Image (spheres, rainbow, N blue to C red):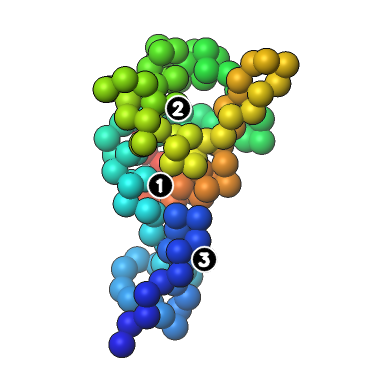
Amino acid sequence: MLKHPKRINSFCDYNNNNNVGGDMNTLGLLVTIDPQIVRALNKSVLKKRVLFYLNSIYPNADYAANIARMIRSDPSNVLGCLRGMGNRYNGNSSLIELGLVEITNISGYKYYRITELGRKVVSYLKEVYGGVV
């Protein structure tokens, strides 16, 4: 009889003894991402680009206009995928609501930084999809 996996920070980790099938990563663990995170990232190339950019500058944070400049997008679209805005960018599937990005307020300005969960998701995406964004 299979046991249900223990959920840790929107990830499911299986050790080799409880492997229920699937691909093994380089650590020997079967890792899956929360389906809501997968769905949100698959629906938006911009969310993936923002996440990969923030991962590339980690542990530093950046402000929305500079993120937009670096990934060659519009600042309003970047804010939409970070925080959610209107109908186009649902707040429930924003990078902040998913726990992939955090806001840091410094001197009244908002800076965005990738979280540890976000770094794990980027690592998983690079391993599964070969880093293609």
Dot 1 or dot 2, earlier in sequence: 2
Label 3: which residue? Answer: 27
What is the x, y in percent for residue 53? 51, 29
In the picture as drawn, the residue positioned furthest to the bottom comes out as 1
Label 1: which residue? Answer: 125
Label 1 residue SS: helix
What is the x, y in percent for residue 87? 27, 22
What's under tag 1, amino acid-wise?
Leu
Most foreground residue, 47 or 123: 47
Residue 20 left/right relative to 59: left
Most foreground residue, 81 or 42: 81
> 47 above or below 79?
below
What is the x, y in percent for residue 88? 27, 22
Residue positioned 43% across, 41% down in the render: 98
The N terminus appears in which quarter of the rendering?
bottom left
Q: In which image quadrant can residue 114 be found?
A: top right
Residue positioned 44% across, 20% down in the render: 79
Asked if residue 91 shows in the view, the reply is yes
Q: In which image quadrant can residue 81 be found?
A: top left
What's under tag 2, amino acid-wise?
Leu
Label 2: which residue? Answer: 82
What's under tag 3, amino acid-wise?
Leu
Most foreground residue, 124 or 34: 34
> 80 above or below 4?
above
Residue positioned 33% across, 47% down in the render: 36
Dot 3 or dot 2, earlier in sequence: 3
The C terminus appears in which quarter of the rendering?
top left
For label 1, the crowd category at 10 Å Cα-Cα, with few meaning under 14, some 14 to 19 and many 20 or more, is: some
For label 3, the crowd category at 10 Å Cα-Cα, with few meaning under 14, some 14 to 19 and many 20 or more, is: few
